[in-house]
Amino acid sequence: QQQVKQSPQSLIVQKGGISIINCAYENTAFDYFPWYQQFPGKGPALLIAIRPDVSEKKEGRFTISFNKSAKQFSLHIMDSQPGDSATYFCAARGYYGGSQGNLIFGKGTKLSVKP
Amino acid sequence: EAQVTQNPRYLITVTGKKLTVTCSQNMNHEYMSWYRQDPGLGLRQIYYSMNVEVTDKGDVPEGYKVSRKEKRNFPLILESPSPNQTSLYFCASKTRDRGIGLEKLFFGSGTQLSVL
C-alpha cells in the first residue's frame, strides 16, 4: 500500500497554542519521513524529517513524534505563531518495487494561527 | 543561490495547444521530478528522472511527457492539454540519498496552468 493518510485537512489554532498534524502509513518499507511546509505562492520546503529508528526529533518549536509499531507519525508545533500559517505535508520514502526512493505525500493540512 | 527555476509562473492556454514548462536546477542534482498540486489531493508525482536520459512514470503520468537530455534541465511537455490538466505544477530536485543522511527535496516556485 503506497498511501500516506494525513489529518486533519484544516486546522485553526490560537496564537501560543499547540498545533498537531497526524499521518499514518501502511507500507513498512518506508525508511524516511519528512514534513514540508508551503506558504501561499511558494513551493514546499523541507521543515523537519525523521528516520524510523528514532522516536522523536525536535527542531526549535517543531517536533516529529514517530510510532513505528502503530505506523503513525505526527508534527507538533509548540507556541504556534501567525507566521506558521501555511500548508503542511507529511511524506514517506520507500525503496520498494520500482519506487526508486520517491516521496509519497499526504494530502496536506492547511494551518491557520489566529492572533 | 541554490535554486530550482520554473517558467512560466502562470500560463493560460486552450485545449489541444502543445505547451512546455521548463525547469532548471543549479545544484548538480541527479534526481528531478514533476508534481501537480490540486485542492484536496495534495502533491502527486507525474514523472521523475534518476539521472540524464533516465525517466520514469510517477503516479499520474497520463497526458504528460518529459525529457532529460542535460543534468540541469527537466522540461514538462503537454502535447495536447485538456481542462483536467488545469493545476499548479512543481518541479523539484535532490541529490540521491546514499542511505546515510537525510535528503532534501528542493522545489521550484510553481507554474499555475489553466487549460480552457
Image (tube, rainbow, N blue to C red):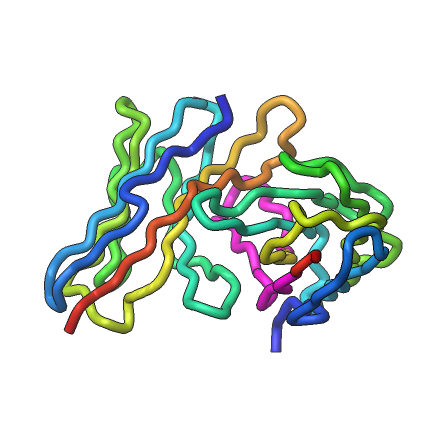
Q: Is residue A86 left or right of residue A77?
A: right
Whether residue B72 is situated above or below residue B96 in the rendered picture? below
**Quadrant assignment, res A85:** bottom left
Q: Residue at x 48, y 60 (%)?
A: A44
In this view of the protein, which residue sits in the foreground, A92 or B18? B18
Q: Residue at x 34, y 50 (%)?
A: A109
Q: Main secondary structure of the magenta part?
A: loop
Of all residues, the one furthest to the bottom in this rendering is B1
Farthest residue toward the front? B116
In percent of width and height, residue B72 lies at: 77, 62
Inspect the magenta stretch and tell me whether residue B105 lies in it: yes
Q: Quadrant of residue B59?
A: top right
Residue shown at 61% from the left, 78% from the top: B1
Q: Is residue B41 magenta?
A: no
The number of callouts visible is: 0
Residue B18 position, x and y percent, is: 85, 56
Nearest the viewer among B9 and A28 is B9
Residue A39 higher or lower than B46, as above or below? below
Instruction: Tell me what residue is drawn at x 58 percent, y 68 percent.
Output: B109
**Toward which corner of the image does residue A13 lie, by quadrant?**
bottom left
Image coordinates of residue A52 in percent, x first then y, are 36, 34
Q: Quadrant of the C terminus of chain A?
A: bottom left
Residue A53 location (% of width, % of height): 34, 34
Left or right: B79, with A34 as reference point: right
Highlighted range, magenta: B93-113
**Which is more toward the observer, A47 or B88?**
B88
